[in-house]
Image (cartoon, rainbow, N blue to C red):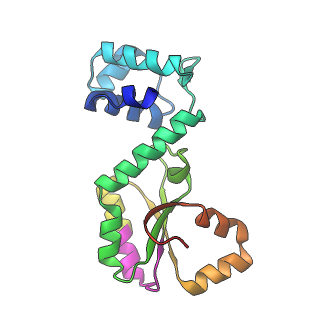
């Protein structure tokens, strides 16, 4: 199984993150090894695994390959868990009922330039609290955040007036609590 091999060491995991999240990277063994601070042998071995799985073809990582997207989602969630995003949001939004991830981070199409899109189910629409959450994401993850507060009234309005966006939020990746 490809994921077991790719997560077999901290160095290989660091390498995989670079390969999957920096799509413009030219796959030259020595330059990738220097960038990731790993041995050229590890880079060669990892590239061989990815080629065998059909994830690398024509010298590029196929970012639309189902395995890449699934592994990126797993890595994204692990990154958010390590940063304790849900815990921090719940500290700021005391009445938080749920937190969901949508957009590129939820579907595994994000790159290093992608912002983090998530919603908070809460009746608290305090702008100061939103700024605190965005600042936390910027400081902890180095990302811009697009955060939506979903009150009961706002959810009803979205369901009625923008069903496509509501459906995207509804089919999100739930990070904590109850879904919408």
Q: Does 151 appear in magenta?
A: no
Residue located at (44% from left, 62% from top): 145
| Residue 27 in view | no
Q: Quadrant of the C terminus?
A: bottom right
Lateral position of residue 43 relative to residue 157, left or right = left
| Residue 41 picture quarter | top left
Q: Quadrant of residue 167?
A: bottom right
> Does any portion of residue 145 appear in the rendered image?
yes
Image coords of residue 64 (percent x, y): 60, 35
Q: Which residues are magenta?
A: 120-133
Locate the N terminus and report the quarter of the image it occupies. Answer: top left
Residue 9: percent from the left, percent from the top? Answer: 27, 29
Q: Nearer the viewer, residue 88 or 111?
A: 88
- Residue 90 locus on image (x, y percent): 33, 74
Q: Nearer the viewer, residue 4 or 30?
A: 4
Q: Residue at the front extreme?
A: 1
Question: Which residue is rendered at x = 61% and y = 79% of the image?
Answer: 155
Q: Is 126 included in the stretch rendered in magenta?
A: yes
Q: Is residue 160 left or right of residue 89?
A: right
The answer to which of 142 and 67 lies nearer the viewer is: 67
Counting every numbered tag in the picture gives 0
Left or right of 45? Residue 65 is right
Q: Residue at x 42, y 48 (%)?
A: 76
**Residue 80 screen position, x and y as percent:** 36, 55
């Amino acid at each position: 199984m490809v994921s077991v091999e790719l997560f077999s060491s901290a160095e290989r995991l660091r390498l995989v993150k670079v390969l999957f999240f920096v799509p413009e990277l030219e796959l030259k063994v020595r330059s990738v090894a220097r960038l990731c601070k790993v041995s050229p042998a590890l880079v060669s071995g990892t590239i061989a695994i990815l080629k065998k799985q059909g994830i690398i073809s024509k010298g590029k990582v196929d970012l639309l390959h189902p395995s890449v997207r699934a592994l990126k989602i797993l890595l994204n969630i692990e990154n958010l868990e390590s940063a304790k995003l849900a815990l921090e949001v719940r500290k700021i939004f005391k009445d938080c009922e749920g937190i969901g991830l949508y957009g590129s981070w939820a579907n595994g199409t994000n790159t290093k330039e992608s912002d983090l899109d998530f919603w908070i189910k809460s009746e608290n629409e305090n702008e100061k609290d939103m700024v605190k959450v965005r600042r936390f994401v910027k400081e902890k993850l180095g990302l811009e955040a697009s955060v939506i507060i979903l009150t009961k009234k706002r959810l009803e309005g979205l369901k009625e007036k923008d069903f496509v966006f509501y459906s995207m939020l509804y089919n999100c990746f739930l990070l904590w609590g109850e879904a919408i």
